[in-house]
């Protein structure tokens, strides 16, 4: 099984794949240098960043064994099978999932190919091989059209959204290869330059000092903005985005960021899960703790009396200078009218049975919800 990996998760993933005896191919120049791998054979599987850098897409043939290995290692992630269809390869071109790629082909030939092929693309991509250089364009177009109508190898596409623990595990693998700060893969998307600079400093400065000062930087940035975004990823891949005003923020004794936010809901309707009305003067306080498997939303009336609590169960919370992020696990705990109860357990079970959530993550979500239910 030959795999090509590129993107912000590539070093950690390549090391993981090497240790699991996969063959790596078509790496970036930087990764060729790091790993001493110069293989240029065609890959069976391609791993690339998702557009928002929250995980990776995996496209290729016979992907299931790889997904199984990843679920065991990167267990708090979501694994969504996007599609399974037939894609094709010929003498001059290869039909791929998306985009346009070239091997070593002259600029003149590239322009000619683009002019002829672009109008024919419809929700697919094309990879032009070096063999295109010396053949008439009509022969290439003929092969392209033939491939579109020819049954071939079954191709799968998966989206993998990495959770907090998975990113920590990727840090572990990356650290075997190159200097890596704590939370490298959590911060990379938002704080790329700071991550790069901090990893240079690792040669001279205690990693704990670097980590603490990055968190101080994050806190100051959030204080300056006075707002923070919250990214709530559902197991079906849907992303809910919120903007909340920061009421308070700080660092715990064990170097974890905590944030309190406030929101004022529009009157009318009912609060989700609480079965209580949204009334004029109500406000909502939400408390987040970095690395926590849940956060608490408290609903108050205009007099400051608590109406109820909604405790959201999720993968451990990530906090950067711009956002709070986690993967929602559907199951939650409600506290109202001196009662506590679990809701949406069946939703969690549905996603577990569909294979999106690993068995370990499913069990962890149940464990957390039961602890919350029995806590005072």
Image (spheres, helix red, strand yellow):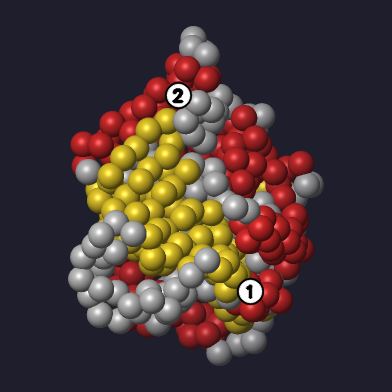
Any part of residue 110 in sight: no
Q: Residue at x 28, y 44 (%)?
A: 247
| Dot 2: element | helix
| Dot 1: element | helix
Q: Is residue 349 left or right of residue 56?
A: right
Q: Where is residue 38 shown, x and y percent of the image?
A: 63, 40
Quarter assignment of residue 277 = bottom left
Q: Where is residue 272 shown, x and y percent of the image?
A: 42, 75
Distance between mark 2 and mark 1 Cα atoms? 37 Å
Please identify the residue farthest to the bottom as the structure is shown: 149
Q: Is residue 168 above or below residue 145?
A: above
Quarter assignment of residue 169 = top right
- If you read the primary sequence from the N terminus, does the residue marked by circle 2 or circle 1 appear first? 2
Q: Where is residue 151 shown, x and y percent of the image?
A: 64, 86
Residue position for label 1? 345
Is the residue marked by circle 1 packed among few (<14), some (14-19), or many (20+) residues within 10 Å? some
Which label number is shown at residue 219? none
Tell me, yes or no, whether the two marked residues, 2 and 1, touch with CB atoms within 8 Å.
no
Q: Is residue 84 left or right of residue 322?
A: right
Q: Where is residue 333 shown, x and y percent of the image?
A: 56, 65
Labels in figure, total: 2
- Toward the viewer: 241 or 250? 250
Residue position for label 2? 212
Q: Residue at x 38, y 60 (%)?
A: 306
Specify the quadrant that holds the N terminus: bottom right
Q: Residue at x 73, y 68 (%)?
A: 64
- Toward the viewer: 269 or 67? 269
Q: Is residue 2 above or below residue 255?
A: below
Quarter assignment of residue 358 = bottom right
Q: Residue at x 56, y 68 (%)?
A: 339
Please identify the residue farthest to the top as the structure is shown: 204
């Amino acid at each position: 099984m030959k795999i090509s990996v590129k993107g912000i998760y590539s070093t950690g993933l390549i090391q993981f794949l090497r240790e699991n005896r996969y063959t790596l191919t078509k790496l970036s120049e930087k990764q060729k240098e790091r790993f001493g791998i110069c293989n240029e054979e065609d890959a069976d599987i391609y791993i690339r960043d998702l557009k928002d850098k929250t995980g990776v897409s995996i496209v290729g043939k016979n992907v299931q064994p790889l997904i199984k290995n990843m679920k065991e290692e990167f267990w708090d992630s979501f694994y969504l099978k996007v599609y399974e269809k037939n894609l094709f390869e010929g003498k001059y071109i290869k039909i791929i999932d998306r985009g346009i790629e070239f091997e070593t082909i002259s600029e003149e030939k590239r322009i000619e190919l683009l002019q002829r092929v672009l109008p024919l693309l419809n929700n697919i991509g094309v990879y032009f091989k070096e063999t295109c250089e010396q053949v008439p364009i009509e022969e290439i177009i003929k092969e392209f059209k033939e491939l579109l109508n020819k049954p071939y190898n079954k191709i799968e596409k998966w989206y993998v959204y990495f959770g907090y623990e998975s990113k920590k595990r990727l840090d572990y693998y990356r650290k075997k290869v190159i200097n890596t700060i704590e939370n490298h893969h959590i911060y990379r998307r938002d704080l790329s330059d700071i991550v790069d600079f901090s990893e240079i400093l690792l040669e001279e400065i205690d990693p704990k000092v670097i980590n603490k000062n990055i968190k101080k930087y994050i806190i100051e940035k959030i204080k300056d903005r006075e707002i923070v975004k919250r990214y709530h990823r559902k197991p079906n891949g849907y992303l809910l985005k919120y903007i909340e005003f920061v009421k308070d923020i700080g660092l715990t004794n064990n170097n974890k960021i905590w944030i309190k936010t406030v929101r004022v809901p529009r009157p009318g309707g009912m609060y989700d899960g609480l079965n209580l009305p949204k009334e004029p003067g109500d406000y909502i306080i939400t408390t987040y703790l970095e690395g926590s498997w849940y956060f608490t939303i408290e609903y108050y009336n205009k007099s400051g009396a608590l109406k109820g609590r909604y405790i959201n169960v999720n993968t451990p919370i990530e906090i950067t200078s711009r956002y709070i992020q986690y993967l929602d696990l559907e199951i939650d705990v409600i506290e109202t009218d001196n009662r506590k109860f679990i809701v949406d357990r069946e939703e969690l079970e549905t996603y577990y049975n569909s294979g999106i959530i690993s068995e370990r993550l499913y069990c962890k979500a149940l464990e957390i919800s039961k602890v919350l239910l029995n806590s005072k």
